[in-house]
Amino acid sequence: MTYHLLNAVFLAGVVLVVLLAERSRRRRGRRHPVRATAVTLVVLLLLTAVFDNVLVGLSIVDYDPARISGVLVGVAPVEDFAYAVAAVLLLPAVWELVGAPGRGTGAD
């Protein structure tokens, strides 16, 4: 299995949860915090780039070249960034679906 396929399966589940959360958010008349999500994504991708390059550069983590695309950010394969993207999208979606503490008290 390639990392692209693994990411596709994983991200498909994330997309489903995000779509459910967006539907819930719209029903409540709330908007998605696009700016906050974008800033968080940029910061997390930068941190992931640094951390992953250290891990791969020190040979703590290794990737089978036959299972990656060959597109690298430094020495880290681009496929490794899918988890950061998933985290930025999934955490607020789950938060929306399970109900944030303080909801309905004017704290949102």
Image: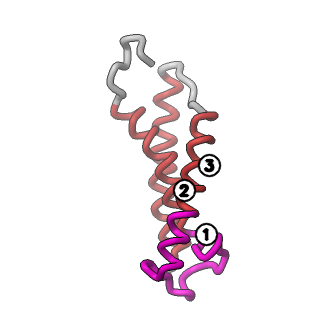
Quadrant of the rendered image containing residue 92: top left
**Which color mode does the image show?**
secondary structure
Closer mark to the observer between disc 1 and disc 2: 2
Residue 69 located within the stretch drawn in magenta: yes
Residue type marked 3: Val
Quadrant of the image for the C terminus?
top left
Q: CA distance from mark 1 to mark 2?
A: 14 Å
Within 10 Å of the Cα at label 1, are there few (<14), some (14-19), or many (20+) other Cα atoms? some
Q: At 54% across and 56% down in the image, what residue appears? A: 47
Tell me the number on the disc at residue 47.
2
Determine whether 108 is above or below 16 in the image.
above
Q: Earlier in the sequence, mark 1 or mark 3?
A: 3
Taking depth in this image into account, of 75 and 29 the one nearest to the observer is 75
In the rendered structure, find residue 22 and report the number of the disc placed on it. none
Q: Secondary structure at mark 3?
A: helix
Span highlighted in magenta in the image:
50-79
Residue identified by numbered label 1: 78
Classify 23 as above or below 64: above
